[in-house]
Image (spheres, rainbow, N blue to C red):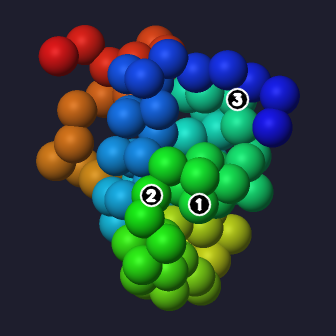
Amino acid sequence: MKKEFTERELDRIIEMAWEDRTPFDAITYQFGISEQETIEIMRREMKPSSFRMWRKRVQGRSTKHSKLRTDEINRFKCSRQRNISGNKVSKR
């Protein structure tokens, strides 16, 4: 992987990857990394058992993959989630 991230950015990427309703496209939009690069980060930063559990859960999940979503859902986020602003890290 070519990009270097701060600890805070890595935490946010992992948090977004764990969220069931945040698709990989949202991570790509905010951080400029592909789904495969997100998976590599998760593999590197998590315990092996946690990674396997996460990977099993998101594989094929329609909410994580925009192409698997119905046409009715045309947003990156859950309607109850704050707006994605394009900032690299959300304000806390």
Say which residue appears at 59% left-offset and 84% top-offset: 60
Q: Which residue is mark 2?
A: 46
36 relative to 59 in the view: left or right: right
33 relative to 43 in the view: left or right: right
Q: Nearer the viewer, residue 5 or 91?
A: 5
Residue 78 image offset from top left, x and y in percent: 29, 53
- 6 is higher (above) or lower (below) than 53: above
Say which residue appears at 42% left-offset and 46% top-offset: 14
Q: Nearer the viewer, residue 84 or 7?
A: 7
Tell me which numbered mark, 2 or 3, is placed earlier along the sequence.
3
Question: Helix, strand, or loop for circle 2?
Answer: loop
Which quadrant is the C terminus positioned in? top left
Figure quadrant of residue 40: bottom right
- 30 is higher (above) or lower (below) than 21: above
Say which residue appears at 39% left-offset and 72% top-offset: 50
Query: Answer yes or no: do the residues labelled 2 and 1 have beta carbons within 8 Å?
Result: yes
Neighbours of disc 3 within 10 Å: few (<14), some (14-19), many (20+): few
Neighbours of disc 1 within 10 Å: few (<14), some (14-19), many (20+): some
| Cα gap from disc 3 to disc 1, whole angstroms | 18 Å
Q: Which residue is mark 1?
A: 43
- 88 is higher (above) or lower (below) than 25: above
Q: Nearer the viewer, residue 87 or 1?
A: 1
Q: Which residue is mark 3?
A: 32
Q: Three-letter amino acid code at disc 1? A: Arg
Q: Three-letter amino acid code at disc 2? A: Met
